[in-house]
Image: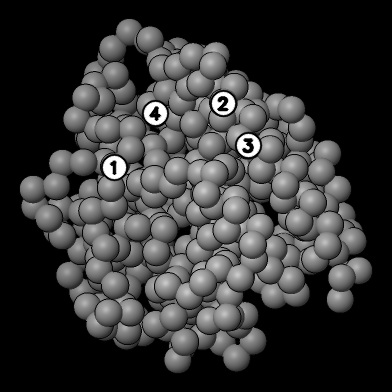
Amino acid sequence: MTKIKEAALESELTKIDVTEELAACPIDFSKSQVANPRAGQKQKEYNNGLSKSNFNERKKYEANQEPQFNQLFTDGTLPVKPGKYRLIWSKHCPWATRIAIAIDLLGLNTVISKGVVDPLRPAGVVGDWFFTLDANNEDPVLHTHALSESYLRADPTYKLRTTVPALVEIGTGKVVNNNYNTLNTELALAWKKYQSATAPDIYPVQLRADIDALNQIIYTDVNAAVNEAGLARSQADYEKYYERVFNRLDWLEQRLSKQRYLFGKQITDTDIRLFVTLVRFDTVFYQKYYVNKKRLVDYPNLWNYAKDLYTVPAFKNNTDFDAIKKRFYQVDHTPVSDLTRIIPKGPDLSIWEEPNDRKRFE
């Protein structure tokens, strides 16, 4: 590995303990009703014809799990071939949105298709995602009704959670990679031949060690820490992650006071990874997970930076505030009579269209 150039990054990296597992959403696994309105609910079984499940029967699913499918393009295991793969993602999910943004930003949307699952699962279902937004409840390319079908085609014995994002081989219908920690790097390095002429180099060789370091810092202290606050079982545990989030946001606010993006004048993979949490912060995390010391709009540099990225079509077009709010507040298709909940009308989303000041760094 190339040596980290920024001493500050090397120092910050020593302060964290990175565990890059596939993190479960607190909406499903938290024991606190703040994050998971079904916590402590009386068990009830539902059968919608597609899946029969009970939202309190989660013993077979762990809150965190290692990525189970890690085939790579960069080592030659997976052939780089246009039209061969389809990204299945959910528009509510920050982990999945990373990959959707990268595909469009790199201009790979002409060679890698994307399919979207419903952010609302059927009542009672925890471990699967369904194509109920498509005609006939079926993905039009894979011709499957549930994402679990592709997991089972890859491994008939698979019994863990079905997660997004999932890169699926179209011909076989098998999941080949569900690791959101590596997919963007794979696309950046192995698919250069098919990237658009105007695509940014989101993983430039001279910055790779520094990008890897800051990616881990942001993953631990921002991306995952907001979830951990929602999963917290005690006041002390919650406060630990609360402090971690805001200490890091303060640090990032200072970093962005000196440059347009996290690594100067160019958008990198790290910007994608930070954006997906920032764009959900005021709408969801500030309210839902009690990380409420400050809103994103209270950070001048972080807020203008996020608005700046939002002007880029790949970021804006893959941000669906309606899907985000539905998943985090409506939760699933459980009838309101069985699970009472309210979806907030705000915040005002028009402010994302307001001008930003980041061009001062050009």
Task: Report the residue marked by disc 2.
Answer: 240
Mark 4 → mark 1, Cα distance in angstroms: 14 Å
User: Is 128 placed left or right of 267 in the picture?
Assistant: left
Depth check: give the residue in front, 81 or 10. Answer: 10
Give me the C-alpha separation between circle 3 and circle 4: 21 Å
Which is in the foreground here, disc 1 or disc 2? 2
The CA span between labels 3 and 2 is 9 Å
Q: Mark 3 packing: few (<14 Cα in 10 Å), some, or many (20+)?
A: many
Q: Please state the horizontal and vertical placement of residue 324, each as a whole percent of the image.
A: 57, 41
Badge number at residue 65: 1
Mark 4 near mark 2, Cβ–Cβ under 8 Å? Answer: no
Neighbor class of circle 1 (other Cα within 10 Å; few <14, some 14-19, many 20+) is: some
**CB atoms of marks 4 and 1 within 8 Å:** no
Q: Secondary structure at mark 4?
A: helix
Tell me whether the residue at label 1 lies in contact with that at label 2, contact meaning CB atoms closer than 8 angstroms.
no
Measuring from the top left, give residue 15's x and y in whole percent. Answer: 54, 44
The structure residue drawn at horizontal position 39% and vertical position 82%, both measured from the top left corner, is 190
Q: Please tell me which residue is depicted at 60% across the width and 53% down the height of the picture.
A: 11
| N-term-proximal mark, 3 vs 4 | 4
Q: Point out the tag, 3 or 1, that comes first from the N-terminus.
A: 1
Please indicate whether residue 360 sits to the left or right of residue 34 in the image: right
- Between the residue at mark 4 and the residue at mark 2, the CA separation in whole angstroms equals 21 Å
Report the colour scheme.
Answer: one colour
